Amino acid sequence: MKRLMLLSLVCSVLPAQAHHGVASLGAASLEGPGAPVETSSSATLPQGKWLAYLKVDHARSEQGILPPPEVENDYNQYWMLGLGYGFTPWLSGYLFQPYNIKQDRPGGYESEGFTDVSVMGVVGFKYDDGFMLVPASESLDDLMDWHFTLYGGLSLPTGDADHRLSDGSIDPGMSLGFGKPSFSYGITATRQFSKNGTAVFEASQIRFQEYEYDDGQTMTFGTETRLNGALAWRLMTDAQSRFRLDGNVELNFLRLGRDEENGAKAEATGGDILYAVLGARLYKDNMSLGLAVKKPIWTDLNEEDDQQGAEGKEDYRLIAAFSVLF
């Protein structure tokens, strides 16, 4: 069965740290499992097929907590270009190029440009009277089996980690790169439990390395741990026009470790956040458009009152992703 691969990204915004997009992977067709917006689904690209995608995440921060000019982020925008290829039915590879726009204070953009390129590999397998690699084709009954993926990747230091602001200073949170590779890995589980409903689960982690900037300061960003769950529900299908509409609800838990600045634990960094996501996916032929609103519904941040503009302190995030398989 020809399947449309969907990619979406979770972009993190900390008060003084510029984090990055994390690739989430999933597949859906006119029939079969659905794919949520933020949580990675368990699917690989069809062998010999390419996927191109463009995604934007617009994060609007809370306003009015601190008076100007001490207000941190007004809003951030994270753009992502992606390209994937199916090497085998069970092995896919991806290349991502982010572009970030970050406003640190009222009055203009403080940082804008291309950031670190990242690569990722995904291995897909399923359970059907035992574990096996994903075969080249599956019936609708086969698609209702438990499906899983293991994925891993790293960012490459192609961005300008020592990007200087208009006053000549270096703020690691406003930099256009991490200076050294970061490493990501995770596992997903997906099961279509009815004709229209699909449950998706994901656990992942990202780890960073210490980097010394041109001005002598050092930074190690805190480890990011994610636990996600989602329900995708097929609302409408028109086989003649090859159109499908899915609704999605998700819970995304994020644990941020404390950053380390110059070898010491940084204040007003890290903590736990639970996000609620409400979204939809539209499919037409070999194209897809995903739209979602993401809001923090519970937080337990370290020194929370000082984390203006931090992840978990957003008013909302608007997410849109367009993908095409060819």
Image: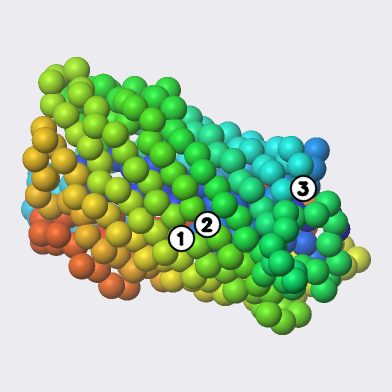
Q: Report which residue position mark 2 lands on.
A: 187
Q: What amino acid is at disc 3? A: Pro
Residue 178 in picture, x, y percent from top left: 32, 31
Report whether 128 appears left or right of 98. right
Left or right of residue 173: residue 202? right
Q: Where's the C terminus, which quadrant?
A: top right
Number of the label disc, if any, that sits on residue 203: 1
Q: Tell me what residue is drawn at x 44 percent, y 55 percent.
A: 204
Callout 3 crowding tier (Cα within 10 Å): few <14, some 14–19, many ≥20? many
Residue on which disc 3 sits: 89
Label 2 and label 3: CA atoms lie apart by 18 Å
Q: Position of residue 108 (x, y in %)?
A: 26, 36
Residue 160 figure quarter: top left
Residue 122 in the image: state x and y as whole percent. Answer: 61, 46
Q: Earlier in the sequence, mark 2 or mark 3?
A: 3
**Residue 158 appears at what percent x and percent y?**
42, 23
Disc 2 versus disc 1: distance between alpha carbons? 6 Å
- CA distance for labels 1 and 3: 23 Å
Is residue 104 placed above or below 42 in the rendered structure?
Answer: above
Task: Tell me: 277 left or right of 144.
Answer: left
Give the amino acid type for the residue marked by disc 2 in the picture.
Answer: Ile
Number of numbered discs on residues: 3
Residue at left 34%, top 27%?
Answer: 180
Looking at the picture, which amino acid does disc 1 mark? Ala
Q: Is residue 160 at least partly visible in the picture?
A: yes
Residue appearing at x 69%, y 62% in the figure: 131
